[in-house]
Amino acid sequence: MEQTVLITGGAGFLGSHLAERYLLSGHRVIALDNFATGRQENIALLQKVAGDRFLFIEADVCKDWSTWIPRIPASWMTGLKSCFHFASPASPPHYQRLGIETMWVNTLALEHCLRFADQLGAHVTFASTSEVYGDPEVSPQTESYRGWVNTWGPRACYDEAKRFGEALIYTWNQKRGTQHGCVRIFNTYGPRMNPVDGRVIINFLVQALNDQKLTIYGTGQQTRSFCYVDDLVDGIVLYSTRRLSRPVNIGSEGEFSVKELGEMVRQIFAHKNLEFEYQPLPADDPKQRRPDLTLARECLAPWGGPKVDLKSGLLRMVDWLDKELRSKPGGLATAPSPKVQHQ
């Protein structure tokens, strides 16, 4: 049955993949973005995929939604049952540059989304993050773990905004009898990542393709778990379809140190003899990041975790980035060294 979904941040990495999934399944998608960090080429791709089943509205979702709601066809509004609030800078260089905007879009804009959804009886899925766990003292992290966080540091604008967003949804549900929810997204990678995103996988691959040294912050012993974007979207779609209303971790349980990831990239580009370049570890950089997926397997069955292993995912990324490299006369730029890295 055809339905309509609304996705804020639809021009972004995750938002565009989520939109594409629904479009390829025969549904209609309304995507909102102001291109603060989203990319116009993602919207162009989605328009090619679906034509008249895709509506893009350029809008700042922190502002009054009544200015653009009339642009949605009445028939689309009738079938709108799922909203995804995915608008937000998500990489360290972006949320540090847009710190205040990051806090507003995860709070004020989330309120706008909740009010809009309630008018239609729609379910909201909020894109939360593993960053709500801060620099965790336990691993893997379960949804009941409250985190080890810092409200006064370079990550606070993002981490605390997401924590507030979760608290807003919980309180909203309690006071209004709604059933909105959130997914705690762990490190995700895949095609359409911004080449100057600043996160470790895209940095390593762009540096490798540009014959540069691979930058490691600290000793490289800090660990992350990396989930391929298609696997992540599988879980998110199931979460929304079941209209869940509790935080659920979605990611990969495979844990790799940053140095191990770098060695994997060096193996892929063995013909280049790439070297590591070490830089000081940024403030508040988490030492470990790995989800406990027990609850996800219970709530999202048959989703049982990622199907794409890290090596296979990296090879897919290399193919995509190579095409990007060939399509841009100036090649692929690398991100400037941010104060926070390795997310």
Image (cartoon, rainbow, N blue to C red):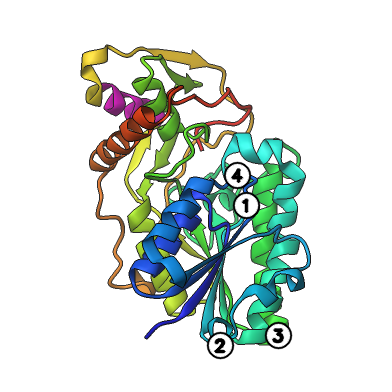
Vertical relation: 218 (above or below) 87:
above
Assign the magenta stretch its main secondary structure. Answer: helix
For marks 1 and 3 on the same chain, the one whose residue lies earlier in the sequence: 1
**Relative to 26, 284 lies left or right:** right
Residue toward you, 45 or 64:
45
Residue that badge 3 annotates: 176
Residue that badge 4 annotates: 37
For marks 1 and 2 on the same chain, the one whose residue lies earlier in the sequence: 2
Q: Amino acid at mark 4?
A: Thr
Task: Tell me the CA gap for discs 1 and 2.
Answer: 27 Å
For marks 3 and 2 on the same chain, the one whose residue lies earlier in the sequence: 2
> Percent x, y for residue 97?
70, 36
Q: Amino acid at mark 2?
A: Thr
Tell me the mark number nearer the camera, choosing from 1 and 2.
2
Q: Amino acid at mark 1?
A: Ser
Does the magenta segment cover residue 259?
A: yes
* Numbered circle sitting on residue 78: 2
Residue that badge 1 annotates: 88
Counting labels gives 4
Does the magenta segment cover residue 337?
A: no
Task: Tell me the CA gap for discs 1 and 3.
Answer: 25 Å
Q: Residue at x 37, y 44 (%)?
A: 191
Tell me the mark number nearer the camera, choosing from 3 and 4.
4
Magenta range: 258-266
For marks 3 and 4 on the same chain, the one whose residue lies earlier in the sequence: 4
Callout 3: SS: helix
Task: Tell me the CA gap for discs 4 and 1.
Answer: 8 Å
Q: Residue at x 68, y 65 (%)?
A: 110
For marks 4 and 1 on the same chain, the one whose residue lies earlier in the sequence: 4
For marks 2 and 4 on the same chain, the one whose residue lies earlier in the sequence: 4
